[in-house]
Image: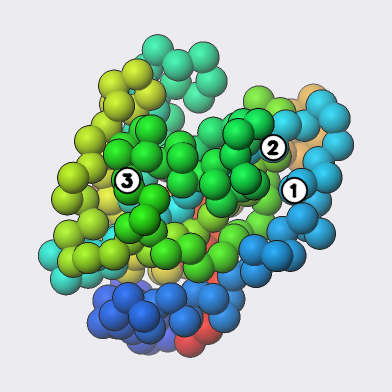
Amino acid sequence: MSRLSDDAAITTRTALQINHLDLQQRLVSCLNPLAGMAAKGFEAAPVPDRPAAILVPLLRLAGQWHVLMTKRAEHLAHHAGQISFPGGKVESQDDGSVSAALREAFEEVRLMPQSVSIAGGLDAVRSPAGFIVQPIVGIVGGDDGLDGLVADPAEVDLIFTLPLSHVINPSNFRLVPRETDGRRDDYWVIEHDDHRIWGLSARVLNDLCRRIVMTV
């Protein structure tokens, strides 16, 4: 891992030491308010874009804050085997993006909705499959956020966590230049020893990194 700058090191210590309430307050100050997400183009996404939502869960594990992530099952039609967050399309029975993100997290990894305190949203992103994806950031209660979580083999091959100290170090991100059909299509990658985290998931994490660093 790259050596942290003095400013990043301060950010890392802060992220590791704060409790659930302090983290909630810090995130609320830097995330998009839920009431404002429709104005950012999610609810009114133009056809053929389809609304979707993902949950970005922050949890305590061995005294440190982590981000919960999943590896998608290899047999899925879209993004098979890629690193992602619990989530999926907004269904007719969902009461908006928060409801969809919590429902999908329960279906995929058995994360109980009542254990998650919603802090706000990140910027919506368009997926290659034609979805407008709204990331919802939530804080999982308790000191062992993995307790009781079970991957649904129909959707998830692996549950793992990424230390928040890694996520909030900007030097762990790099922007890879790419051109698709004659237009710029750069994508983010986050350095990790065991998993290839890139594309939409890395973009969401970079957004989270930028916001948290700005609060210090």
Residue named by callout 3: 111
SS at mark 2? strand
Instruction: State the residue at coordinates (65%, 67%).
Output: 32
| Residue 164 placement (x, y as % from top left) | 34, 65
| Residue 158 placement (x, y as % from top left) | 27, 32
Residue 42 numbered mark, or none: 1
SS at mark 1? loop
* Amino acid, disc 2: Pro
The N terminus is located in which quarter?
bottom left
> Is residue 72 at all visible to an observer of this figure?
yes
The foreground one among 84 and 185 is 84
Residue 89 numbered mark, or none: none
Nearest-to-viewer mark from 3 and 2: 3
Q: Is residue 41 left or right of residue 185?
A: right
Q: Is residue 24 above or below residue 122?
A: below
Residue 51 numbered mark, or none: 2
Quadrant of res 15: bottom left
Nearest-to-viewer mark from 3 and 1: 3
Q: Is residue 78 above or below residue 206?
A: above
Instruction: State the residue at coordinates (60%, 39%).
Output: 94
Question: From mark 3 to mark 2, how far is it between C-alphas?
Answer: 22 Å
Tag 1–tag 2 contact (CB < 8 Å): yes
Lower position in the chain sequence, tag 3 or tag 1: 1
Specify the color scheme.
Answer: rainbow
Instruction: State the residue at coordinates (65%, 69%).
Output: 33
Lower position in the chain sequence, tag 1 or tag 2: 1
SS at mark 3? loop
The foreground one among 158 and 89 is 89
